[in-house]
Image: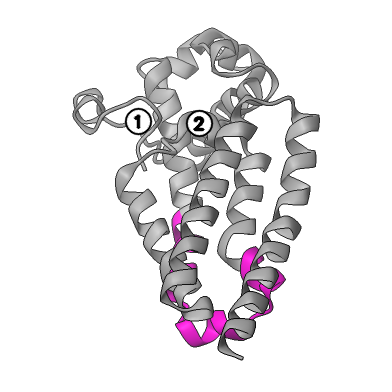
Amino acid sequence: MRRKDVTKSEADMRGTARAPRQARGRERREQLLDAAAALIAESGLAAVSMHAAAERAGASIGSVYHFFRDKDQMLDALAERHDAELQPAFDRVLQRSDAEWTALSPAEMIEQLIGWAIRYFVRHPDALATLDLHDQAMHAEFRTLIDRVMRARLGAELGSHAATTFDAVVLGTLLFTREQDPRSRDVVVAALPEMMATYLTALEAKQKRAKG
């Protein structure tokens, strides 16, 4: 998933940040990224600069420029760090069979399909700020997964409608939480999985009535 507002060609031209070989260098680089993430969480992307990250991490400005050419490269590194954490979890979700998904309760299914991802983004505001939530390839893969799971549980027509709704709700919630005060954001995220599970339960009851 590319960083928000950065095209593939721009990222290629900019290159990747310096990867330190020694443990001390890796630790310092992570501290600088943690500092940038904290600045985003507190005040948004506008608060991030090379000097602000250095000050927050207790490092010299020369140390920041040793690892990152500029602010954009540092933000790219933040996005790459979240990619590395999210992809294995997403791969595990993709590997579940239809039988596994249909065996879960509505609440369990929502949690394992969607809930974990929403909570990850809320725990990491810098991921929300730096990753491109509209990335077409990843969104298409996620949309296909939701459609497959919903069709397995609800049948073709009702499942397709449910998938469209869930996809819109998830993307809309992530975009909403990007802009909100943390207190409002946490209230919305805490309520969302239960709301979606209730909706799925109602749809499954509707499907049973239609069959009966």
- In the picture of the structure, the residue carrying the numbered disc 2 is 29
Q: Residue at x 43, y 71 (%)?
A: 157
Q: Residue at x 69, y 78 (%)?
A: 105
Give, as a single range, the part of the protein colored magenta. Answer: 87-111
Contact? badges 1 and 2 (CB < 8 Å): yes
Q: Is residue 6 above or below residue 91?
A: above
- In the picture of the structure, the residue carrying the numbered disc 1 is 18
Estimate the x, y position of residue 141 in percent, counting from the top left: 35, 58
Estimate the x, y position of residue 81 in percent, counting from the top left: 47, 42
Front-lying residue, 127 or 150: 150
Q: Is residue 27 left or right of residue 69?
A: right
Residue 162 marker = none
Whole-angstrom CA distance, mark 1 to mark 2, is: 9 Å
Front-lying residue, 141 or 79: 141
Estimate the x, y position of residue 52 in percent, counting from the top left: 59, 11
Q: Is residue 98 magenta?
A: yes
> In which quadrant of the rendered image does the C terminus lie?
bottom right
Q: Is residue 18 left or right of residue 123?
A: left
Specify the amino acid type for callout 1: Arg
